[in-house]
């Protein structure tokens, strides 16, 4: 029987020491090619003016913006400490990204502001995903695309063990488990989407997580 979700946090990672360790972890995931960038690009995202929700230290958005030749990259992040790392990393990439402090429950942007909206690894922290999905639809332009990827709570135990043992630095491993326990299953997220403006989204499972994608 599948265990119920255990809510992790809706405040992001605020502690500067933990943020620094997460930056090391995210950089390692990028270097291994495990951060989902290729899958996001393959989902039909086309670049343009791009919005990333929960960018953390920014690697996913920066890699995707580079891959898709984005016109602009904006990140909406709940943690000021994460924004500092994302800005530093954007400078290393040579990309003029704009990181804004905010919450995806109430995005600080006008209607139809972006051609692309995407997020990786933060869905399980959204305190009200229905509101967040509706906000994604609101700020997306007609003809725009979205892609949301995250962990999947019902992942095979062997895959879970493999990722856990390879997570570096080791101090991030408890956080990996708590995030996995807070993640949704395909059936749970499909049911949530039925009550949102993203009700025509395609939801699929991948090697370790789930992917929600579609267009407006």
Image (tube, grey):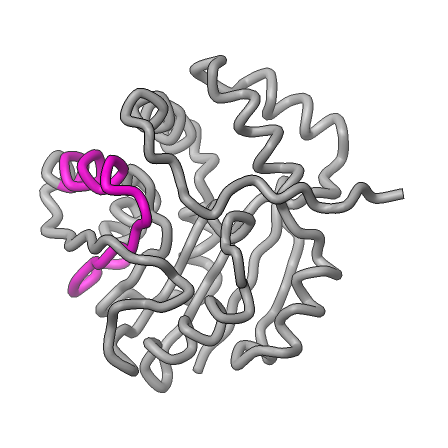
Percent position of residue 121, x then y = 48, 45
User: Closest to the observer: 43 or 136?
Assistant: 136
Instruction: Confirm whether residue 89 shows in the render.
Output: yes
The percent coordinates of residue 174 (x first, y second) are 56, 22
Q: Is residue 155 left or right of residue 69?
A: right
Magenta stretch: residue 71 in it? yes
Q: Is residue 112 above or below residue 183?
A: below
Residue 106: x %, y % from top left: 36, 68
Q: Is residue 207 visible?
A: no
Task: Please give the name of the residue rendered at 61% of the width and 69% of the height, measured from the top-left corner.
Answer: 202
Q: Position of residue 91 (x, y in %)?
A: 10, 39
Query: Which residues are the magenta region?
Result: 68-90
Q: Is residue 199 left or right of residue 213?
A: right
Furthest residue toward right:
1
Report the quarter where the N terminus lies: top right
- Say which of 142 and 180 sits in front: 180
Image quadrant containing the C terminus? bottom left
Residue 59 sits in quarter:
top left
User: Which residue is found at the position 24% from the left and 79% from the top?
Assistant: 110
Within the magenta stretch, is there residue 170?
no
Q: Is residue 10 above or below residue 116?
A: above
Q: Residue at x 42, y 55 (%)?
A: 119
Going by the picture, which residue comes out furthest to the bottom?
Answer: 142
Q: Is residue 31 above or below residue 45?
A: above
Q: Relative to 180, say whether 135 is above or below.
A: below
Point 54% across, 18% down: residue:
166
Asked where in the image residue 198 lies, by quadrant, the reply is bottom right
- Count of numbered circles on the image: 0
């Amino acid at each position: 029987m599948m265990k119920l979700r255990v809510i992790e946090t809706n405040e992001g990672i605020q502690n500067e020491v933990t943020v620094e360790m997460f930056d090391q972890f995210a950089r390692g995931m990028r270097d291994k090619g495990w951060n989902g960038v290729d899958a996001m690009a393959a989902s039909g995202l086309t670049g343009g003016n791009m919005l990333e929700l929960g960018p953390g230290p920014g690697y996913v958005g920066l890699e995707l913006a580079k891959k898709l030749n984005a016109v602009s990259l904006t990140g909406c992040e709940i943690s000021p400490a994460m924004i500092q790392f994302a800005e530093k990393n954007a400078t290393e990439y040579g990309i003029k990204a704009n990181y804004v402090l905010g919450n995806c429950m109430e995005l600080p942007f006008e209607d139809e502001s972006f051609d692309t909206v995407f997020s990786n690894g933060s869905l399980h922290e959204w305190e009200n995903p229905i509101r967040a999905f509706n906000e994604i639809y609101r700020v997306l332009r007609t003809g725009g695309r979205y892609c949301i990827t995250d962990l999947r709570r019902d992942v095979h135990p062997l895959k879970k063990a493999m990722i856990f043992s390879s997570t570096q630095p080791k101090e991030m491993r408890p956080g990996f488990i708590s995030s996995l326990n807070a993640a949704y299953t395909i059936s749970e997220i499909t049911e949530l989407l039925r009550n949102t403006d993203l009700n025509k989204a395609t939801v699929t499972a991948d090697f370790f997580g789930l992917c929600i994608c579609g267009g407006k």
